[in-house]
Amino acid sequence: MRSCDIINDMKNQCESCLLPFNQDPAGKHEHPQYCSLCFKNGQFTFKGTGKEFRDMCYKAMTTEHNIPKWKALFFIMMIRFFAPRWKTKK
Ligand SMILES: [Zn+2]
């Protein structure tokens, strides 16, 4: 993912993890602002803090998806600063 996509295309991506909705693994998402991974059956799937969420994303990216560490770090930084769900929280 390129950073410019995130900034230009905020309406079409998850406000929690910044996943573009057209890449949603379920193919659809029940909440207009969140993807199927973050919001399921009427509630958030992750209920911890923003920091815990980013730690979890980082771990998943580097272990399960083999994403290089620098890229994973960049990605969680984007979440930290641009994802509306976490913007107001530490
Ligand atoms: Zn999401």
Image: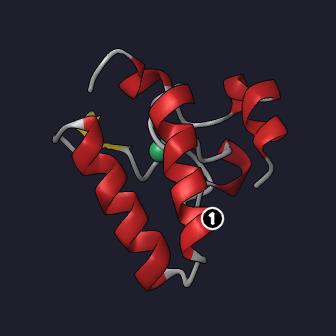
Number of other residues with Cα within 10 Å of mark 1, as a class: few under 14, some 14 to 19, many 20 or more: some
Give the x, y percent position of residue 8. Answer: 82, 26
In-front residue for pair 53/38: 53
The residue at 53%/80% (across/down) is 65
**SS under mark 1:** helix
Give the x, y percent position of residue 34. Answer: 48, 34
Residue under circle 1? Answer: 71
Color style of the picture: secondary structure
The amino acid at mark 1 is Lys
Query: In what quadrant of the picture does the C terminus appear?
Result: top left
**From this viewpoint, which residue is outermost toward the left?**
48
Residue 80: quadrant of the picture:
top left
The residue at 57%/52% (across/down) is 75
Does residue 34 lie above or below 27 as drawn? above
Residue 45 can be seen in this image = no
Give the x, y percent position of residue 38. Answer: 38, 45
Residue 47 can be seen in this image = yes
In-front residue for pair 29/18: 18
**From this viewpoint, which residue is outermost toward the front?**
70
Q: Residue 43 vs residue 69: left or right?
A: left
Give the x, y percent position of residue 61. Answer: 48, 71
Q: Is mark 1 within 8 Å of ligand 1?
A: no
Query: In what quadrant of the picture does the N terminus appear?
Result: bottom right
Q: Residue 46 vs residue 30: left or right?
A: left
Q: Residue 45 vs residue 21: left or right?
A: left
The residue at 52%/29% (across/down) is 81
Residue 43: quadrant of the picture:
top left
The residue at 17%/40% (across/down) is 47
**From this viewpoint, which residue is outermost toward the top?**
88
Does residue 6 lie above or below 68 as drawn? above
Report how many numbered discs are placed on residues in the image: 1
